[in-house]
Amino acid sequence: MSSTSANGGVGGYVYLDHAATSPLRQEARAAMDPFHDVVFANPSGSHRFSRVARRAIDEARDVVAEVIGCRPGEVVFTSGGTEGANSAIFGAVRRNGGTAVCSVAEHHAVLHCVEHVAGRVLPVAPNGALDARLVRDTLRDGDGTSVVSVMTVNNEVGVVSDMVEISRAVRRRAPQAILHTDAVQAACWLDLRDIWPHVDVMTLSAHKFGGPKGVGIMAIRDGLSLEPLIYGGGQERDRRSGTLNVAGIVGATAALAVTHASRPVELARVSALRDMLVQGLMSSVEGCSLTLSGGAAVPGIVHVCIENLENEALLYLLDEQGLCASAASACASGAMEPSHVLAAMGVPKSRAMGALRLSLGHTTTENDVDAAVRIVADAAATLRSRSGTAGAR
């Protein structure tokens, strides 16, 4: 069970990695508890205990539909955002044939799917977003495009896509195509009801907004035909077979409901914390610069690049000093390589190697921000003193 320290951190640490996973909300924990041992039955059964479980699923579907702005029958529960993205892309191509299209800056759950079916990968603007004009100029009616997948909020740098204009471009140039959005990073910061009217499929992951891991949500517009990714007992109206994770679904729904209800207050609170964090980093960490200009990213993601540092070594020191963060870079062939998102944005490799993502959420406090600035500044100074690059800019 996670705990909050006197300094505002989680479990004694300063936790600024909410974009990777957010601590379980107490509302989710409380909602889940009865379904672990009291209401344990399979919701597909016919006896009274199953009916209680089924009622909980139905109520959860109603709540999710209200938050997204869709119909309850359009809600499908999955194992997470990755399954949802795979279902949307593979489901469209396998059912309708044609080509899948996405941007080069998508999460790998989308990007690898599109590459796997030999789809088209479009470049992005220097801010990491897909330009709707490029979509309009690339797609052609009758070119066989079956699905276009665009993330609402980029998981690394936090830039918000213009889903309204992208939708217009897709509808105008490839009206036969299904438009899917990976909204995994959007639920905390954007009103999903503003997005749903413009897309055909939306996918979410519960652990990004304080729900349990291993639970996802898909909204699939009525009348849309996707080939199922998982076959079996025909659950979820034959769209996703498998025994429903009742406790997880109830917990995910509770977390989504409180996230939606508290969003206006949290937007203001986290925006203020974000501004404090940015100001502190810019004034205390030598060679630190924002990857995106102010206001271009959602409040919960602060992405910076620190000159003359390698983030692998930086993250090691941050962890030693009690700060949880990420660099959004991967290890390939034994050598650290910059993030594919930063590469797509045209960020020089020398700068991208010093990338650091600090992501805020519902447990973040002013004490966390103050501590994070101090820890990052100390760690950067330590690494520079070791390498002899202090004072370099």
Image: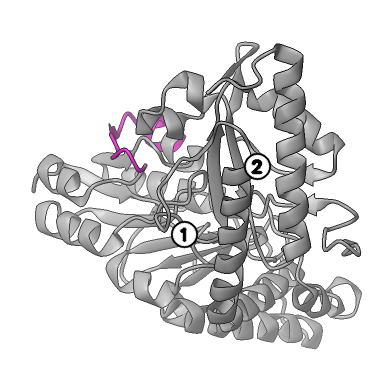
Left or right: 342 as drawn, with respect to 26: left
Q: Residue at x 58, y 84 (%)?
A: 261
Q: Residue at x 44, y 35 (%)?
A: 341
Q: Quadrant of residue 334?
A: top right
Amino acid at dot 2 = Ser
Front position in the image: 180 or 315: 315
Q: Which residue is mark 2?
A: 284
Structure colour scheme: one colour
Figure check: 113 above or below 237: above
Left or right: 1 as drawn, with respect to 150: right
Span highlighted in magenta in the image? 112-127
Magenta stretch contains residue 58: no
Q: Secondary structure at mark 2?
A: helix
Figure check: 177 above or below 59: above
Left or right: 71 as drawn, with respect to 142: right
Q: Residue at x 30, y 33 (%)?
A: 119
Q: Which mark is residue 183?
A: 1
Magenta stretch contains residue 122: yes
Figure check: 276 above or below 91: below
Q: Residues within 10 Å of mark 2 (few under 14, many from 20)?
A: some
Pointer 2 with pointer 1, Cβ within 8 A: no
Q: Nearer the viewer, mark 2 or mark 1?
A: 2
Q: Residue at x 39, y 46 (%)?
A: 89
Percent position (x, y) of residue 262? 60, 81
